[in-house]
Image (spheres, rainbow, N blue to C red):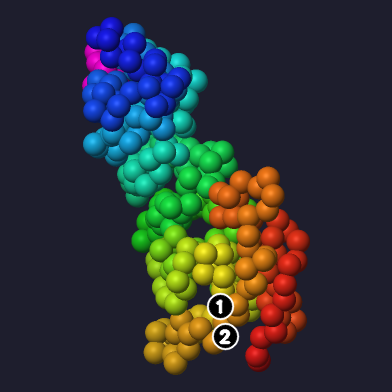
């Protein structure tokens, strides 16, 4: 009703104006109105949800349900009496505050294809991947928590068990993986071995086999969120860095092929290096959140180099 709209306008502009109980009621009222048969009510609700996304997201009980509704309005905007711009605005403002739920819904959409790859279904999958990449480009830091799942979603479209699907989506999905690597120092791809590694906020490094679209290794050992990963030139070794832990680790990832799982070198950390705290502090006037994506690691002959904002800051010698 009018009271919900008034409170939603207030909450959207003044985040501390509503107590938690009132904000929860307003959020639920807007979500209900979003599914209203009255197109005007639904459009107003969509707009107000987008304006106060950070406020309402805290009180959403079914995040996936909300994203699913917003995505449906985006995909079939004409059926809902709205415009593509309005539908896109709501989806792209809610997604970064509900990243895990957003990626799950994108995963559902990405897999709404068939072995026949009819035009509508393949286009639906392509659109979902494009939407995911668009959010990653605009909001990389909020999307970090959902990064491993986002990689899984993209790789699911390259499953060799569905060769026609893989062939039709190869260009779009590989472009998405390249964009992920470009945006996140926590992701890296090795062309020759077709391995894709991604560091998680849970201190794990997950290595995928792009040929089979499956997880290949999970490396454990870090004690903080992963800040950067990279393969060496052969793709058999990996350097990883955790800013929170203040440590670089050097891994032998193991062998390829059918006997790789029985190798004595499966996921073995062979060296680790402590990074001086002075190199990982927040700089004057710097946004602390930037620490999550400003570091990088790279291999040089006989060494691992830590970079910050693209500039080398220290080097560690590695054993052969």
x and y percentages locating residue 110 in the rendered image? 39, 44
Marking on residue 271: 2
Q: Nearer the viewer, residue 139 or 291?
A: 291
x and y percentages locating residue 79 in the rendered image? 34, 17
**Number of numbered callouts drawn:** 2
Q: Is residue 74 above or below residue 176?
A: above
x and y percentages locating residue 314 in the rendered image? 72, 72
Quadrant placement of the N terminus: top left
**95 with respect to 58 (left or right):** right
Residue 166 seen in the current view: no
Asked if the magenta segment contains residue 280, the reply would be: no
Q: Nearer the viewer, residue 317 or 66?
A: 317
Residue at image position (65%, 72%) is 276
Q: Is residue 303 above or below residue 97?
A: below
Q: Nearer the viewer, residue 2 or 228?
A: 2
Q: Residues within 10 Å of mark 1 (few under 14, many from 20)?
A: some
Boundaries of the magenta span: 32-37
Cα separation, mark 2 vs mark 1, equals: 6 Å
SS for callout 2: strand
Q: Is residue 105 above or below residue 301?
A: above
Q: Residues within 10 Å of mark 2 (few under 14, many from 20)?
A: some
Q: Is residue 153 above or below residue 198?
A: above
Q: Are marks 2 and 1 in contact (CB under 8 Å)?
A: yes
Quadrant placement of the C terminus: bottom right
Residue at image position (73%, 58%) is 310
Residue at image position (28%, 7%) is 2
Q: Of marks 2 and 1, which one's residue comes earlier in the chain?
A: 1
x and y percentages locating residue 125 in the rendered image? 42, 41
Q: Which residue is mark 1?
A: 249
């Amino acid at each position: 009703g009018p009271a919900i709209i008034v409170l939603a306008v207030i909450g959207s502009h003044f985040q501390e104006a509503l107590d938690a109980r009132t904000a929860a009621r307003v959020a639920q009222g807007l979500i209900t109105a979003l599914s209203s048969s009255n197109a005007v009510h639904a459009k107003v609700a969509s707009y107000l949800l987008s304006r106060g996304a950070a406020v309402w997201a805290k009180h959403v009980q079914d995040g996936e349900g909300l994203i699913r509704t917003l995505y449906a309005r985006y995909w079939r905007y004409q059926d809902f009496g709205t415009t593509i711009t309005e539908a896109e605005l709501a989806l792209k403002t809610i997604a970064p505050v509900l990243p895990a739920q957003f990626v799950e819904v994108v995963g559902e959409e990405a897999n709404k294809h068939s072995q026949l790859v009819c035009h509508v279904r393949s286009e639906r999958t392509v659109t979902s991947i494009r939407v995911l990449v668009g959010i990653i480009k605009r909001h990389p830091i909020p999307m970090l928590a959902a990064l491993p799942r986002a990689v899984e979603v993209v790789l699911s479209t390259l499953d060799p068990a569905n060769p026609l699907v893989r062939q039709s989506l190869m260009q779009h999905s590989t472009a998405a993986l390249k964009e992920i690597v470009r945006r996140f120092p926590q992701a890296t791809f090795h062309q020759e071995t077709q391995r894709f590694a991604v560091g998680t906020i849970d201190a794990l490094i997950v290595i995928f086999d792009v040929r089979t679209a499956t997880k290949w290794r999970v490396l454990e050992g870090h004690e903080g969120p992963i800040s950067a990963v990279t393969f060496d030139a052969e793709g058999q070794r990996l350097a990883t860095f955790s800013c929170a832990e203040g440590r670089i680790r050097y891994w032998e990832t193991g062998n390829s092929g059918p006997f790789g799982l029985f190798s004595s070198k499966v996921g073995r950390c062979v060296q680790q290096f402590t990074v001086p705290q002075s190199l990982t502090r927040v700089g004057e006037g710097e946004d602390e959140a930037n620490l999550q994506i400003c570091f990088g690691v790279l291999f040089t002959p006989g060494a691992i180099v830590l970079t910050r904002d693209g500039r080398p800051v220290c080097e560690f010698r590695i054993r052969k």
